[in-house]
Amino acid sequence: MVQLNDDDIEDILKSFAQSLHRAEADGKATINSCLYTDTARKLTEAITQGMGSSFSYDNPNNSLRAHLIANVHKFSGAKSYVQNQEFSKLLTNEDGTIKPFNEFLNDIKTKFYLYNENYLSAEYGTALATGQGAQLWNMYSDDDVLEISTAGDDRVRDSHKKLDGLRYKKSSKFWQTHWIPFDWQCRCTVVAATDNTESDYKKGDKLANDNTAKNFQFNGALKKVVFSEAHPYYAKAGKKLLDAVNDYGLRPVEKLIKDDRLAAATKLSTETDYIAWFNSKINIDERNFTLTDPNGVSVLFTSRKHKGEFYFRDKIINNKESRWKY
């Protein structure tokens, strides 16, 4: 079963419980940063496992993967927020007095593991399947006829057996609202059809609407999300837009970059070292270069020409403030 980091889950539970018990997160819009971070990290791993990693900047999977990763971070925030709100209600006895810490810890432990083992396992499977579906989507051209295929064993739910064999061109509007996964723990896939005859659209669309979970009636590769805003966590959080600092009480990014979990900065001692580093990153043309973030997403830095100079190569190097140091 998928869960938070095996070595840290007990520590995260205690840290979470302590922050609530000390009224550091007493029902306000704040969350435990360790709970949020580890949930997001686990779901990011699922996307990478399903989709792959380190795509070139011009590969469509690169941008799509970045969107999916951003989405699971937002989702992890909403999930952590909901747990904060729900467990805060268990802080007090019926007479309004604060429970002793060990009693409170014991009261929330079972449900904490429900959220962060059982639920997380299903969420991990969804992120994995969405990553696989996103990678598959970009494999095919608009004229390819694609077909839904179940796992074909006795574990396939009856509703998904009804979808088996439905086939349409990739350009069909059917795929705009129906794409793997079709529900929690769905193991269906989409393959290139051997028969290019398309299924009846109206019948197939109704069949898919009737046999796909409501929260899964979208194409994650087109919508660029793993979890849509129809997910109950967002409804429970009661917020249309969720801001990490204002709504969750997380540290601003300038403080997060000091987190020792992040990769060490590249330090260059001389201008010559900078030029060599810059040249090693150029794989587009003389003006532009790419860098890869800790999640393996390639980011393109474009250099506009200004007064005969290219910003990254010339402007930074020639600036009298020695900006190459930065």
Image: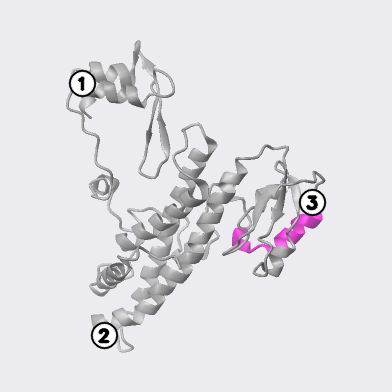
Image height check: is 27 above or below 100?
above
Q: CA distance from mark 2 to mark 1?
A: 64 Å
Residue 225 in sight:
yes
Kind of residue indicated by mark 3: Tyr
The part of the image, by quadrant, that contains residue 278 is top left
Looking at the rendered image, the disc whose residue lies closer to the viewer, 2 or 1, is 1
Name the outermost residue toward the front.
Answer: 153
Q: Residue 294, position in %: x, y? A: 35, 43
Q: Residue 102, position in %: x, y? A: 25, 82
Mark 2–mark 1 CB contact (< 8 Å):
no
Residue 228 in sight:
no
Name the outermost residue toward the bottom.
Answer: 95
Kind of residue indicated by mark 2: Thr
The residue labelled by disc 1 is 271
Q: Is residue 252 left or right of residue 172?
A: left
Q: Which mark is residue 141?
A: none
The residue labelled by disc 3 is 201
- Name which residue lies at 30% across and 58% down: 249
Q: Is residue 130 left or right of residue 120?
A: right
The residue labelled by disc 2 is 97
Kind of residue indicated by mark 1: Glu
Tag 1: Cα neighbours inside 10 Å, few (<14), some, or many (≥20)?
Answer: some
In this picture, which residue range is highlighted in magenta? 201-216
Q: Main secondary structure of the magenta part?
A: helix
- Name which residue lies at 64% across and 69% down: 155
Q: Residue 153, position in %: x, y? A: 67, 66
Image height check: is 224 above or below 153?
above
- Name which residue lies at 31% across and 86% down: 93
The mark tally for this picture is: 3
Q: CA distance from mark 2 to mark 3?
A: 61 Å
Helix, strand or loop under label 2: loop
